[in-house]
Image: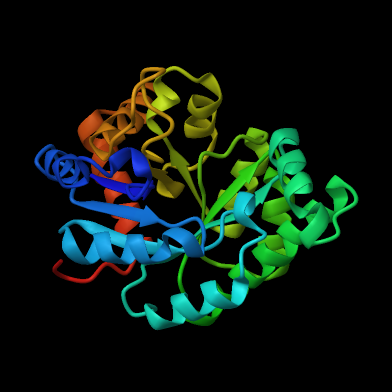
Amino acid sequence: MIDCHSHLCDEEFDEDRKAVVEFSLGNGVSHIVVASTSSADAAKVIEACSALGGLYPAMGVHPCFCLDNLDIVEATVMDHRKSLVAIGEVGLDFTPRALNDLLEKGKETWGFKSVDDVKERQRVVFDRMIDIGLALDLPLIVHSRSAGHYAIDMLEKKRVKKAILHAFDGKAHHAERAAKELGYFITIPPNAVRIESFKKLAKRVPIEKLLVETDSPSLPPTPGERNVPANVRYGIEAIAETTGRSKEEIEKIVTDNAMSLFSFPPTH
């Protein structure tokens, strides 16, 4: 099993990261993609992926960290480009809470006057992250909360060929079009076992365009628990239940899908 998107360098794992990784690798997980969110945790991701087997780094600027210094992030990406398997987590987040939080943070330093200014900053950052992904020929791991079709439109206009729409919360027909017409992959997280919208995605998106992720420590199968990469199996179970196929068949399909997208080093 391949966990195509996690945040194992989140502080929630600082006390037992190695144990969590070992447990996951001992329970059928072969590869764990670990994404950064800003310049603040990029070095931590590289360090963890270098120290622990089974971890593979992705680097980018999450939309909720769009006030970050992009020059620093780009320089860090270029320094470690040979070890990266993706650019992420990147994208747009148009939820009111995220926009208002960034508006407050950016009033003085960025001169933001409205949430429209925040949205524009997110677009500028996402556009630059897309350019980096294209330049390095790496897939993009895309966050698009309350901004699904906007993110897809940007990807399409930039002619992006390799992208993952992670934990997509937009309308299913947008994800279906992104998969069928643009070739993008859609991830199914562990909480799909209790959230119908993800099961709907699993039903409408072609099976050859589905992946599984955990977004650890978020999106657990049981509310209130800390999510871990070993829970990637719940996404597989949700797809199997929705499509009427066996878990073994789904596991092979989504693993093959991930291997076709990521250029993992032969040994790690």
Residue 134 image point, x, y percent: 55, 76
- Residue at the image point whose x is 28% and y is 35% from the top: 228
For the view shown, which residue lies furthest in the front direction? 108
- Residue at the image point whose x is 61% and y is 63% from the top: 68
Displayed quadrant of residue 76: bottom left
The answer to whether residue 52 is seen in the rendering is: yes
- Residue at the image point whose x is 89% and y is 47% from the top: 114
* 179 displayed left or right of 111: left
Residue 151 image point, x, y percent: 68, 53
Where is the C terminus found, in terms of image quarters? bottom left
Residue 162 image point, x, y percent: 51, 64
Q: In this view, does 111 lie above or below 18?
A: below
Displayed quadrant of residue 77: bottom left
Q: In this view, does 205 lie above or below 105?
A: above
Q: Which residue is nearer to you in this view: 268 or 1?
A: 268
Q: Is residue 168 above or below residue 162?
A: above
Q: In this view, does 245 lie above or below 95?
A: above
